[in-house]
Amino acid sequence: IAGITQAPTSQILAAGRRMTLRCTQDMRHNAMYWYRQDLGLGLRLIHYSNTAGTTGKGEVPDGYSVSRANTDDFPLTLASAVPSQTSVYFCASPRSGMNTEAFFGQGTRLTVV
Amino acid sequence: GQNIDQPTEMTATEGAIVQINCTYQTSGFNGLFWYQQHAGEAPTFLSYNVLDGLEEKGRFSSFLSRSKGYSYLLLKELQMKDSASYLCAVRGSQGNLIFGKGTKLSVKP
């Protein structure tokens, strides 16, 4: 089934550890985004990539890094996790064009203890 | 900057009609989206407006007034399964979606 796959689905992580959240799409879309969703704050953009080889910072990029070596994969790395990074993380990707909706992965629930 | 406001919570009765409002302030405008999100799940696309007026899609309709920076989502013949959060979003200059904080709708029998 075409779409966006995120892994892992959930994770409990010790503070200070490094973690990479994976996101893979098989729709050959150019753009991919990482959001975090927190109660009362909604979905906030962490990093984005409008095409393979390019990335940019969103609203809340601190403590996170991304890479976009190819069209399909857009991993999000927490270099040294902190409890404030406890959140649900969503990867999303729209079809090309401004009037197209974004498709979301199923999310990764991360708890940093 | 961008700012999107919508009510935090709403309650409605099964079979009724409910209107969820969204106001936005953006430096540019490339369309307004509504998403539905059930608890513990990913957001799913409901509607898109780029021109003023009403877009109807079954029980759901969405309205846009660009001059007022205003949109609403109208849900008719409410069902229990419509209990969810409804997210208003505008497309930013980088192509990404900028979301409001969401409106949690509870449908009561």
Image: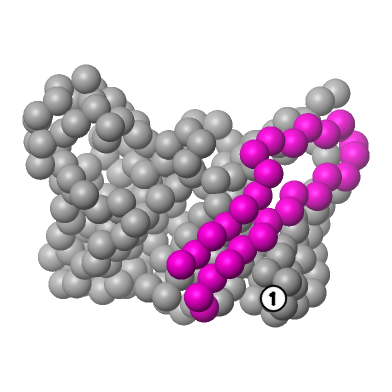
Q: Please give the name of the residue rendered at 17% of the width and 64% of the height, measured from the top-left corner.
A: A68
- Tell me if A19 is positioned left or right of A104 in this view: left
Indicate yes or no whether the magenta region holds residue B49. no
Magenta span of residues: B1-28
Instruction: Write down the residue under mark 1.
Output: B66
Find numbered disc 1 in the image and state the secondary structure of the residue it sits on: loop
The image shows residue A64 at horizontal and vertical percentages of 19, 48
* Residue nearer the viewer, B50 or B66: B66
* Residue nearer the viewer, B86 or B59: B86
Taking A42 as reference, is B29 above or below it? below
Mark 1, chain letter?
B
Q: Please give the name of the residue rendered at 33% of the width and 69% of the height, measured from the top-left corner.
A: A31
Q: Quadrant of the C terminus of chain B?
A: top right
* Residue nearer the viewer, A35 or A8: A35
Q: Please give the name of the residue rendered at 18% of the width and 25% of the height, measured from the top-left corner.
A: A13
Task: Name, please, the residue furthest toward the top.
Answer: A113
Taking B92 as reference, is B17 above or below it? above
- Tell me if B48 is positioned left or right of A36 in this view: right
Taking A12 as reference, is B92 above or below it? below
Can residue A26 be spotted in the picture?
no
The image shows residue B71 at horizontal and vertical percentages of 72, 63
Indicate yes or no whether the magenta region holds residue B2. yes
Q: Residues within 10 Å of mark 1 (few under 14, many from 20)?
A: some
- Tell me if B52 is positioned left or right of B42 in this view: right
Task: Name, please, the residue furthest toward the front.
Answer: B1
Q: Please give the name of the residue rendered at 72% of the width and 78% of the height, measured from the top-left corner.
A: B67
Quadrant in which residue A54 is drawn:
bottom left
The image shows residue B27 at horizontal and vertical percentages of 50, 75
The image shows residue A19 at horizontal and vertical percentages of 14, 37
- Tell me if A89 is positioned left or right of A94 in this view: left
Can residue B70 be spotted in the picture?
yes
Looking at the rendered structure, the kind of residue marked 1 is Arg
